[in-house]
Each structure stands twice: as structure tokens, then as C-alpha cells.
Amino acid sequence: MAIIPLANQSYARTGLPKARLINLYREITPEGPTPYTLRQRPGLVQDSTVGFGPIRCIVTHQGARFVVSGTRVFRAGVQIGLIAGSGIVRFAQSDTELVFVVGGAAYLAGTSSLTAITIPDGDEVSDVAFAAGRFIYSISDTGKFRYSEIGDATDIGDLNFATAESNPDAITAVITLGDDVLFFGESSTEWWAPTQDTAAPFQRYNGRRYDIGCAAQFSAIRIDNGCIWVGTSQRQDRTDLRVYHTGAVAEVISTPAIDALLARCADISLATAFEAPVEGRSFYVLSIPGVATMVRDMREGLWSEWSSYEADIFRVRCADGGVYGDAVSNQLWTLDLNANTDGDDPIVRICSANYPVLRRDRCVSVELFGARGEATTATEPVVEIRYTDHEDADWSDWYEAPIGPTGVFPRARWTGLGMMEAPGRTFEFRCSEDVLFAPYGLTVNDRL
């Protein structure tokens, strides 16, 4: 019996067989019946609710959890102030100070209050970072940044500024990696380092820059000792969007299929990202507005898709310390591998496989195999199948089959699925039951 592997990442390109992996990811199984199985992403378990939502920022500072919920800022569940806007809030912190930036303004968060920080010349602030004892404030729509005195985020002298000058583009994001400071511009990225010169405490690395800009400030995050962001590159008469990772050169980590999704977004500047650690591995969770939430497994280098019930986009958009903020409501969540639901909502898990056909052939049977699991609420859990012989068109209806009794998932079987056409058939499998779903392969027309 030859077991056909399931697709191990999402990929869709015109003229190629489509592969979907939604709310699942690959895990290597050296001793298993196949080289890998598919694991479902953790479910969301409610931690608490804060304010009225949506959750725009979560950060732990000096042992207390700060949450921006709607326009209200909370410390340890107690409101300490109001903040403008509706989008993601950027922040930076030292051992003693926490600064929020949003809507062109910067705020110092205290134990019981929120204080606006005065920026010289009335400059509007677009981002904030912390390095070498100083807070760094990028100035909106310019290549200029200002910096504070050591140990005081609010002490910003009139002459405490510099300009990212290797390319005259506006700074879109600032990220610190160790002692280095990365200034992401619209079309370039510069590396700066601290100095001992109090008159010029930061200087640019000569020769170290990327001719890659940042198209989405909120996509730029630190992860696994590096930084990932949605970047722009100029190629002749067009601008390309890709996902990049820091290195000696900016490394492209997106696939052509991911690039195509980025290009579909009406406003890529609104893309957001956060890190989701799961059992010692890191996931870069990138939400592309109006398109999808694409997730890169940093260990495996593979992309899958996370979605929420009746929505294309995953409902989380910010995270800190294992707590995740809801993009719509006032809920804070945790991720739980033993949870098969997102709160009261089911998790719809979809995977696919492609079966080559040299000439017309009857599909007598299909069997899907998976790991054993415990059903919780579904007394007779089912999995569904659909198929097509024409790339991503003319899909069949969904057909159910029982998974099997609780504690057993030997196989789900379908029969009489019509004639298959060359060059091949794509199968998709879907499960939304409150049950572990961990498929590892299928057989077609196996008569044993």
C-alpha cells in the first residue's frame, strides 16, 4: 500500500497544482508511517477581557501587563490613560521606562498615568526603539530620527537628531537587533551602531545597507535573532513585494505564491505580524488585509495559512509573553495545543494532495489516514472531501465520512468519486469537529 503524502505548505500558482494547508503545519515523524504528519495549530483559550477592544498592543513591563484596548490604556487591568487612533501601537522599553507611539505622538506609560512626550519642533513620531540607554524616535515622512538622553525617554534636546542619509527616503520602521539599530526606509534599509560620542551617539555602518525598503511598518518584527518584514524592491519599471529576513544580504523567504498574495492587497501598509512560539519553534504570523493570514514556520521554512471561523484573516494581530490580542473584540487569548476550538468557534482545518493521472481512470476509493486522538464534543466526528481535475475550478461538493470512534483515527474512506482526468486530481480534506485532526497521508484505489 503506497501512501500518498499530503501537501506540506500552501502554494497556489496559475498552471500548477494548488496546495492548501490551513490551520495545520508540518511536523517531521522519523519513526512514523510517513516522513511527516500534519499538526493542527493551537486553539485559542480565553485569558481575560480588557476594555472594549479591539486589542492594539500588549507588553509586559516591570512585571505588569500593559494593554491598549481601543483608545484606553490599561496597566494590570486598571485604566491609566487614553491614546489616539485605531491601529497597532508601536512601543519600546528600557528597564525603567515604557514608551508608546501612535498617531504621530509618543507617550510615557507610568504606573498610574500616561504622559505625552514633547518632541522638539512639533515633529510627529512614526516609530520608537531603544538602544544604548536611549530612546530613538523616527520622524514621520522624513529620514530624520531624534534620540533621548541616556535614562530619560522624555529628555530630547533640540540638537539630538540625525538623518539616515545613504538613501533619501522616509523611515517607515525602526528595529533594534542587539546593539544594532535598523532604520527601514521606503526603498532602503540602513544599519547603525552606538558610539561613545555624546554629540553623535549613533553612526551608520559604512557599506552595510539593503536596497530593500519596508512596505508595512507593522510587519517588521524581531524573531529568532533576526528581523522579518514585508519589503519593497525596485526592478526596472515595477516595485515588487516580498518577505525578507535579515542576513549578510536581505534574504527572500517568501514564495512566488506569497508574493502574489502580497500584490493582491489593496493597502499593504496595513499588514501586521507577530511571533507565535509553539513547542520551541517560532511562527511568523503575517496578516495581509483583505487577503489571508500567512504563517511561516521558522524551523521548517514552510508557509501555511491560519484563519478564524467565517473569516479569511486570523483574529489575533498582536502578542506578548504567550498572550494574544484580538483584532476585533476585547479578548486576550492563550494558545493551547490541546484545544480544538477558538473559544466557542470551531477551527476549520484544510489540507490537500495531488494525485497524477496519466489517462482517464475511475476513482474507486480514497482513504485518509491520521494520528489517533480524543474527540471531545463530537460523538461521531466526520471529515469531508472534495476534488477537482481542473486546477482550481469545477470543484465537487463536499462529501462526509466518519473519522472513527473516539480514541481511534485509522482512516476515513470515500468510494465512487467518478472518473479522474489527466494530468491529475487535486483532493482537499476539511475537518471542523472538536477533535484532534492530524492526517499524514492517503491512498487512492487501494483495494487491500
Image: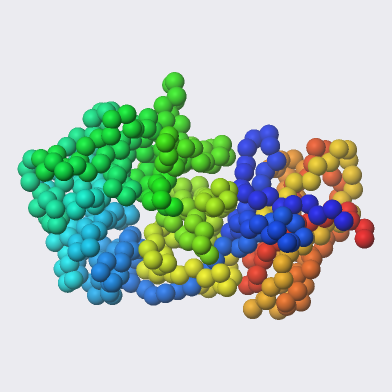
Q: Is residue 213 above or below residue 416?
A: above
Query: Residue drawn at (79%, 66%), measured in percent from left and top?
Result: 411
Residue 168 in the image: x percent, y percent?
Answer: 25, 28
Residue 40 in the image: x percent, y percent?
Answer: 61, 63
Q: Is residue 158 above or below residue 15?
A: below
Do we see residue 157 in this rendering?
Answer: yes
Query: The C terminus is located in which quarter?
Result: bottom right
Do we see residue 270 in this rendering?
Answer: no
Report the number of numbered marks.
0
Side of 135 relative to 403 (left or right): left
Query: Residue drawn at (14%, 57%), measured in percent from left and top?
Result: 151
Residue 43 in the image: x percent, y percent?
Answer: 54, 68
Query: Residue drawn at (21%, 37%), measured in percent from left and top?
Result: 203
Q: In the image shown, does 205 or 245 lie closer to the viewer?
A: 205
Query: Residue drawn at (52%, 70%), measured in percent from left and top?
Result: 336
Q: Residue furthest top?
A: 236
Side of 131 relative to 294 (left or right): left
Side of 420 relative to 353 (left or right): right
Query: The N terminus is located in which quarter?
Result: bottom right
Residue 397 in the image: x percent, y percent?
Answer: 74, 55
Q: In the image shown, does 156 or 394 lie closer to the viewer?
A: 156
Q: Is residue 375 above or below residue 415?
A: below
Q: Is residue 118 above or below residue 342?
A: above
Q: Residue furthest front?
A: 196
